[in-house]
Image (spheres, grey):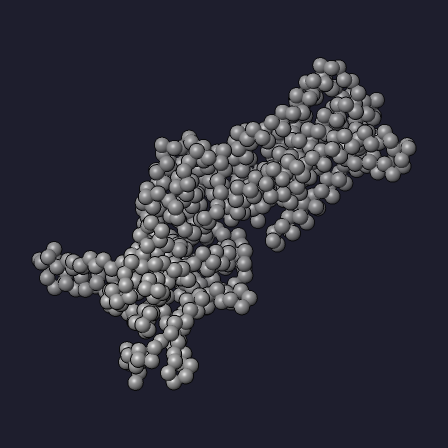
Amino acid sequence: MTFSIKRSIAILQKDYKDVSKNLFVGSSIFMPLVLAALYGRLGVESINEFYMIFNMTFCLVAAYVQCSLIAEEKEKNTLRGLMLSPASTVEILAGKSLLSFIATVLVIAFAAFLIEYKPENILVISIALILSTVFYIGLGTVLGLVTKSVMEASVVILPFMAIFSFGSFLTVFAEKYPILKVAEYMPNSQLIILASEVQIGASLADIWFNLLVILAWVAVIYILVVIVYRKRMMD
Amino acid sequence: MSILKINNLEKHDGHALIFPPFSLEVSAHEAIAIHASTNVRLILLKILVGEMPASNGEWTINGKSYSESKKDYFEQVGMYFLDDGLYERLTVKDHFDFYKKLYHSKLPIEEGLRIIQLEVKRNSKISKLSVSEKRRVHFGRLLFQNPALLIFEEPDQNADLETKRVFVKMVRMLIEKGKGVFVLTGNMESALAITNKVYRLDEAGLHMLDILSEEESTEELHRDVQNLEEKQKEEEIIVQPVRFEKIPTKVNDKIVLFDPPEIDYIESHEGQSNIYIKGEMYPSVFTMTELEKRLHPYGFFRCHRSYIVNLQKVREVVTWTRNSFTLVLGDTKKSSIPLSKTKMAELKGMLGLK
């Protein structure tokens, strides 16, 4: 099976045109930006607050856009046409993921500018953010494969948004309830820990463990993508 | 060269026989229509698209079979399903841009728009188009895909006249280019508009439609005449007298017309004659005697004082005792109709029995 980048780009362009006219999904892209602008003017300085916005961006842009792109194809009965076309599933998903990826990167960059976040080591932070983006796109793909319509997708995304955007606050209670230690290993908490370390001058060598944990999450979610996809194909 | 080759394909579902084994070939430069009920149509399509296994038999498209390589198989075939969707927010031109790239097609977008007659609406969003216009966008997709075989499900259901015209023209063009066209429809009229090779597929099997062989023989006759007397060509065109023989029935305030072969049987109930068609009852405006007279040339038979039956639909004659008989019809409900003693002899005569 040869991978045709031309077809993926065609799908990317088609989805871009579609999303740009879709107010419902489009507005969710701007939510983190509005919040970022607000926080920036309020003068928020802590890493935790910055990353709450970033994690929310991941959920709203990477995961939700990806999820609704797939769910809408199903809802409007256009997925079968795509599946019967010469484009392979990998090419279809690649086209869609690419759009979510570009959108996420742009929103994150713009949000960082708005809240005036200046990381000490921009390279390490970029790697971590990109890895996280890949993870959330995987999450969105899984949810997209499970849900059947955009409405369903917007409901399903809510608990994940709660966990991943605000879940990092759970670690505050970790000393009182040891069970919440687990929350530290969530990809969002790992990202925050990593960012705080970097801010106090840690280099790539110091935070490799955190990166590895995020990488493990990426691996887990993509294995899940393959499993869910196989199962859905059976139906 | 045949493009679609179906060999002894059959399907059972539980106790029900959907269709018995049948074989069919669609060659290049050929369009074939199958007239079938919704259920048969959906199941046949699901088998062809690989969503449902067949009970028996195999089929290939351009020598590629679904079981061997899905990728090669789907490269040979383009399908239009009635429930296919479009991207509502995109314009017609956006769609064609996308299809052109998706299928690596060389067909210019303008050309595609011209064939489906949507040049004026190229920048309209799909959600602003009518059902018929959306249908034509789907046809456009198949033009870009340009496969060897095109399968259409109910291509002109609920479509306007322009769309029907566009479709018929498009099918002609595809046939000229050496494609195979396979249409599944529940509407005989639309099947006949597209091609003169119409088959009916149901639990009784695949049958070529009789009307067509008649048409072909008239054509042949016509050709012979042409050869013999070329000069008198124009005068020799056979003028078929238009015979209007529809049976009117009254449903509420409407008058519904039926073709005699559609009718299963007619029952008289308290002086009112009711026409039964596929289990539905329609009150007739005629008396039994009038109906008998009108329908006699179509193979109808007054089997009882209050029953007229379409003999084409009779499957069995059941003898209960020496003097009581019942006709069982071949329809889905297996309706049974009484046959009176005196009429039995007449029926036997008609069947050529003693």
Residue shown at 46%/60% (left/top)?
Answer: B40
Residue B301 appearing in the image: yes
Please state, as top left, top right, bottom left or bottom right, where the C terminus of chain B lies in the image.
bottom left
Residue shown at 48%/33% (left/top)?
Answer: B90
Q: Is residue B13 above or below residue B191?
A: below
- Given residues B245 and B19, the one toward you in this image is B245
Please state, as top left, top right, bottom left or bottom right, where the N terminus of chain B lies in the image.
bottom left
Residue B129 % position (x, y): 42, 36
Q: On the image, which quarter does residue A172 sit in? A: top right
Residue A111 % position (x, y): 68, 22
Residue A231 % position (x, y): 65, 52
- Given residues B26 and B258, the one toward you in this image is B258
- Given residues A16 and B266, the one toward you in this image is B266
Q: In the rendered view, does B217 fall on the left or right side of A121?
A: left
Q: Is residue A150 above or below residue B3?
A: above
Q: On the image, which quarter does residue A160 sit in? A: top right
Residue B137 appearing in the image: no
Q: In the rendered view, does A145 fall on the left or right side of B346?
A: right
- Given residues B236 and B281, the one toward you in this image is B281
